[in-house]
């Protein structure tokens, strides 16, 4: 389930990438990503804490992470 204001998507083809998962967990200041044995987990309870810093977008290959502003759609 998305947050009320923000949804974050990680592309299926990189979702199980352990290195990317670790990087996302490290860069997000509000702990939206968790690195697990299965790759990237998105902590839905934290989605609306997103500060739109774009650090996750910079950490991932182009287009593989999306931060979606639900209030604009
Ligand atoms: S934009 Fe910033 S706060 Fe939002 S999910 Fe990405 S790293 Fe986390």
Image: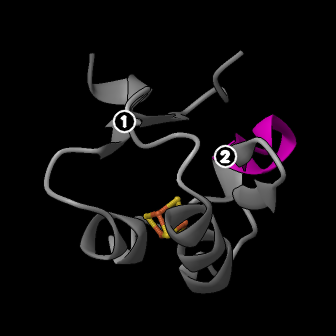
Instruction: Confirm whether the magenta stretch covers residue 61.
Output: no
Residue occupied by mark 1: 69
**Element type at mark 2:** helix
User: Is 33 placed left or right of 7 in the picture?
Assistant: right
**Element type at mark 1:** strand
Check the image and report above or below for 8 versus 70: below
Residue sitting at x 70%, y 57%: 32
Decide which of 27, 37 is in the foreground and name it. 37
Question: In the image, residue 53 lies at what x, y percent?
Answer: 39, 75
Check the image and report above or below for 56 versus 14: below
Q: For residue 27, what is the image quadrant? A: bottom right
User: Is 32 placed left or right of 70 in the picture?
Assistant: right
Residue sitting at x 43%, y 26%: 12
Mark 2 CB lies closer than 8 A to ligand 1: no
Q: For residue 38, what is the image quadrant? A: top right
Whole-number angstrom distance, CA of label 2 to CA of label 1: 10 Å
User: Is 66 placed left or right of 23 in the picture?
Assistant: left
Magenta segment boundaries in residue numbering: 41-47
Q: Residue 6 carries which label?
A: none
Q: Residue 48 carries which label?
A: 2
């Amino acid at each position: 389930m998305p947050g009320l204001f923000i949804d974050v998507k990680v592309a299926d083809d990189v979702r199980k990438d352990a290195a990317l998962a670790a990087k996302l967990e490290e860069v997000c200041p509000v702990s939206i990503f968790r690195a697990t044995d299965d790759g990237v987990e998105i902590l839905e309870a934290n989605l609306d804490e997103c500060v739109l810093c774009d650090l996750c977008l910079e950490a991932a290959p182009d287009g593989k992470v999306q931060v979606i502003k639900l209030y604009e759609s």
